[in-house]
Image: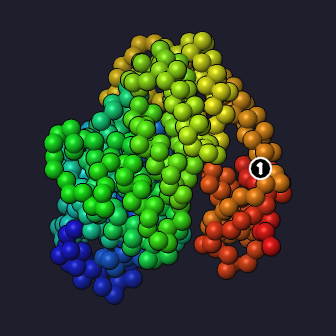
């Protein structure tokens, strides 16, 4: 961490009552990065605002997984240009999208009013970049094409006081043919066990009840280091993802542990056993499918078949009581024929997922998928997406009815976003539950009886 640069910027800003606004696009890894940015920025004497027009510093933390993320960024940049012209607002653009050279070139050509662009490997250098801007007013491009180091000790500002995300590794080694992530976040690098465990201990001391472990492929934690024979210090017996789960399960104060995203090909028996044995590890497993067709999975470079995926699900169902599943599915990948899509529907029917995150395939420049000739027409993609959505919603409606009349343990997270008089929480299986109750219930684990079901939430009653 660049403590000196933070102090320098803080001294420049002292007494000025400056405000910042940060717009985060993309996944929970991006949100975790934004929390670190906020931690650094607030130490540099900025206070947060949700109003772009009131901000002296605007930061875009970008995602490049979906094409519409680019449209969103460019649209917002057009909007903030007037604030730059009116009050000299500093515009900083960071995150995954800045690792794509064609995007940076487009920014230079069409949105040249920006002050800073920084990549995924240089987030920790933001205080130094900001100091240079305040000192020299010269545009800064701070991007590394090589894999960055894992930087510990960055300040972090979390909005949520009950649930916290904890990154356990950066990067990805899988190179799925539809995905740009390995190119923009680099190869897998794992955090040291001691650093992760100490962070979770600190979160428990601060009163956090639930942690979400983050990584592009969490169940290969420390695998790259072992394969490259890179030495690392074991701590509390942690030398794998399974042993990490067991170590975190022992931390007092933490009541729930979740994780995303694992890869089906790396779901080893020791991880399954750890989920089974650890009472705090939620029994909802996010198991990305992407496609139910073995042919499409091969084209995606996913390294498992339809049959292997279903076999893994059955193994987990036998070994882990009350296990449930969520998944990701891409519709319309190049070469997807009707029978391939039917295979996807078949897997959805057989697994009966608790939640399905559905995406229409989006071409990403620089990936093998983008260069494939057998692209699917947009109209066909949308028709198939609608068919999948219909099936998933039918299944959810049936599964929701199974909750009615049963007791569920929920972690109360706060007030309902749609009704100030209700509280909201989630079950182990990540179902949203709304209840009547006083604010002193927020942050507590409660047994509730489910009294009614609705498509996207359940209604519960606190057990007396």
Q: Position of residue 244 (x, y in %)?
A: 37, 54
Q: In which quadrant will I find the N terminus?
A: bottom left
Q: Observer-nearest residue: 377 or 52?
A: 377
Q: Observer-nearest residue: 263 or 270?
A: 270
Q: Is residue 71 visible?
A: no
- Tell me what residue is drawn at x 53 percent, y 42 percent: 286
* Residue 374 drawn above or below residue 36: above
Q: Observer-nearest residue: 101 or 389?
A: 389
- Tell me what residue is drawn at x 63 percent, y 31 percent: 351
Q: How is the image coloured?
A: rainbow
Left or right relative to 369: residue 382: right
Q: Which residue is mark 1?
A: 403
* Residue 126 drawn above or below residue 95: below
- Tell me what residue is drawn at x 47 percent, y 21 percent: 305
Left or right relative to 18: residue 135: left
* Residue 295 drawn above or below residue 68: above
Q: Position of residue 444 (x, y in %)?
A: 63, 72
Q: Position of residue 367 (x, y in %)?
A: 34, 27
Residue neighbourhood size for the residue with mark 1, other residues' Cα within 10 Å, grouped as few (<14), some (14–19), many (≥20): some
Q: Is residue 127 visible?
A: yes
* Secondary structure of the residue carrying numbered label 1: helix
* Residue 313 drawn above or below residue 168: above
Q: In which quadrant will I find the C terminus?
A: bottom right
Left or right relative to 49: residue 129: left
């Amino acid at each position: 961490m660049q403590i000196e640069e933070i102090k320098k910027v803080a001294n420049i800003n002292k007494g000025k009552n400056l405000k910042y606004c940060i717009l985060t696009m993309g996944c929970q890894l991006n949100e975790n990065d934004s929390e670190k940015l906020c931690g650094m920025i607030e130490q540099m004497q900025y206070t947060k605002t949700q109003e772009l027009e009131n901000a002296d510093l605007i930061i875009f933390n970008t995602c490049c997984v979906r094409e519409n993320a680019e449209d969103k960024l460019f649209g917002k940049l057009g909007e903030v240009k007037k604030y730059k012209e009116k009050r000299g607002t500093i515009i900083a653009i960071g995150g995954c999208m800045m690792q794509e050279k064609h995007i940076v070139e487009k920014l230079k050509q069409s949105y040249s009013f920006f002050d800073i662009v920084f990549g995924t490997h240089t987030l920790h250098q933001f205080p130094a970049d900001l100091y240079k801007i305040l000192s020299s007013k010269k545009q800064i491009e701070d991007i590394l094409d090589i894999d960055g180091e894992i930087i510990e000790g960055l300040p972090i500002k979390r909005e949520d006081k009950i649930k916290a995300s904890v990154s356990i590794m950066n990067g990805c080694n899988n190179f799925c043919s539809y995905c740009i992530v390995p190119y923009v976040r680099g190869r897998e690098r794992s955090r040291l066990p001691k650093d992760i465990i100490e962070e979770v201990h600190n979160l428990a001391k601060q009163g956090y009840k639930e942690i979400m472990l983050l990584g592009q492929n969490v169940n290969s934690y420390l695998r790259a280091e072992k394969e490259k024979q890179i030495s690392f210090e074991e701590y509390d017996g942690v030398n794998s993802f399974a042993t990490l789960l067991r170590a975190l399960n022992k931390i007092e104060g933490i009541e729930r542990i979740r994780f995303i995203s694992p890869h089906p090909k790396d779901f080893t028996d020791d991880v399954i056993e750890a989920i089974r044995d650890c009472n705090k590890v939620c029994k909802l497993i996010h198991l990305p499918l992407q496609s139910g067709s073995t042919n499409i999975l091969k084209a995606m470079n996913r390294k498992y078949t339809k049959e292997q995926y279903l076999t893994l699900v059955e193994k987990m169902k036998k070994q882990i009581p009350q296990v449930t599943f969520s998944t990701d599915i891409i519709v319309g990948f190049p070469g997807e024929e009707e029978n391939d899509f039917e295979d996807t529907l078949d897997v959805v029917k057989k697994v009966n997922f608790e939640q399905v995150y559905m995406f229409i395939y989006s071409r990403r420049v620089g990936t093998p998928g983008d260069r494939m000739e057998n692209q699917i027409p947009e109209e066909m993609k949308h028709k198939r997406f609608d068919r999948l959505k219909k099936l998933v919603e039918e299944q959810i409606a049936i599964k929701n009815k199974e909750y009615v009349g049963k007791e569920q343990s929920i972690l109360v997270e706060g007030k309902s976003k749609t009704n100030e008089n209700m509280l909201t929480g989630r079950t182990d299986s990540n179902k949203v539950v709304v209840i009547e109750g006083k604010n002193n219930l927020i942050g507590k684990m409660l047994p509730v009886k489910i009294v009614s079901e609705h498509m996207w939430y359940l209604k519960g009653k606190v057990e007396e």
